[in-house]
Image (spheres, rainbow, N blue to C red):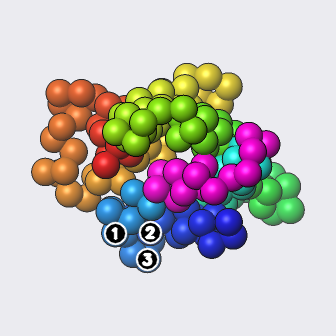
Amino acid sequence: MTMLVLLCAAGAWLGFANPFLQVPPAALLLPLGLLCIAARAKGAKAAMKTGWLAGTLAGSGCLYWIYIPVQHYGNLPWYLALPCPLLLASALGVYYGLFTLFMQRALRRFSPLLVPLCAGFLWAGMEWCMGRLLTGFSWLTLSSSAAPWPWAVQGASLIGAYGLSGALAAV
């Protein structure tokens, strides 16, 4: 499971915008890793916990920069600003944990033909909830990882950003 958690974090860090190297298809490793975690989890608690950990690591790697504006513009001392990205990522990790939990249930209850469809709808719903419930933080959507390639995000004009994210997660 540790390798799958690291796979999710590496996929998110390489797939989403960062100052070193962005490889947009790598972002697909995040939902794939969470799906593999769901398939290997021994129970609901393990699926939720491991999915939360993977989402927290993925989010902290992508949101590391939040420390700078919090410290600089918020006038917080560095030792109070430093945990802010981790705290935000751990809140977002709850959504990834719930996705993993629901996918673990879907893998056990649905036929293999319905699982990708379920993953797509769950992912789109998860991102919609991330943007509206609790955190109101709609960043790190799977569709935004393809922003460097304008041709890859054209589908958003038909099905929206969350729909495109769901379609990418279903692949």
- Among numbered discs 2 and 1, the one appearing first in the sequence: 2
Q: How many marks?
A: 3
Tell me where residue 166 sits by quadrant: top left
* Vertical comparison of 79 with 151: above or below: below
Which residue does the image show at 69% across and 39% down from the upper left?
A: 94
User: Residue at label 1?
Assistant: 23
Magenta span has 40? Answer: yes
In the figure, residue 6 lies in which quadrant? bottom right
Mark 2 Cα-neighbour bin, 10 Å: few <14, some 14–19, many ≥20: many
Which mark is nearer the camera, 2 or 3?
A: 2
* Tag 2 and tag 1, C-beta contact below 8 Å: yes
**Residue located 39% across and 65% down the image:** 26
Image disc number at residue 170: none
Compared with 115, 149 (above or below) is below
Can you give x and y, in whole percent of width and height, for residue 73 in the image? 67, 49
Left or right: where 105 falls relative to 157: right
Q: Is residue 95 visible?
A: no
Residue 14: image tag: 2
Dot 1 surroundings within 10 Å: few (below 14), some, or many (20 or more)? some
User: What range is drawn magenta here?
Assistant: 30-45
Query: Residue 158 lies in what quarter of the image?
Result: top left
Circle 2 SS class: helix
Q: Amino acid at mark 1?
A: Val
Measured from the top left, where is residue 2 in percent x and y?
69, 70
Q: Position of residue 1 (x, y in %)?
A: 68, 66
User: What secondary structure predominates along the stretch shown in magenta?
Assistant: helix
Residue 130, visible in the rendered structure: yes
Q: Earlier in the sequence, mark 2 or mark 3?
A: 2
Which residue is at 62% across, 22% downward? Answer: 133
Q: Amino acid at mark 2?
A: Leu
Q: Residue at x 60, y 49 (%)?
A: 38
What residue is disc 3 on? 20
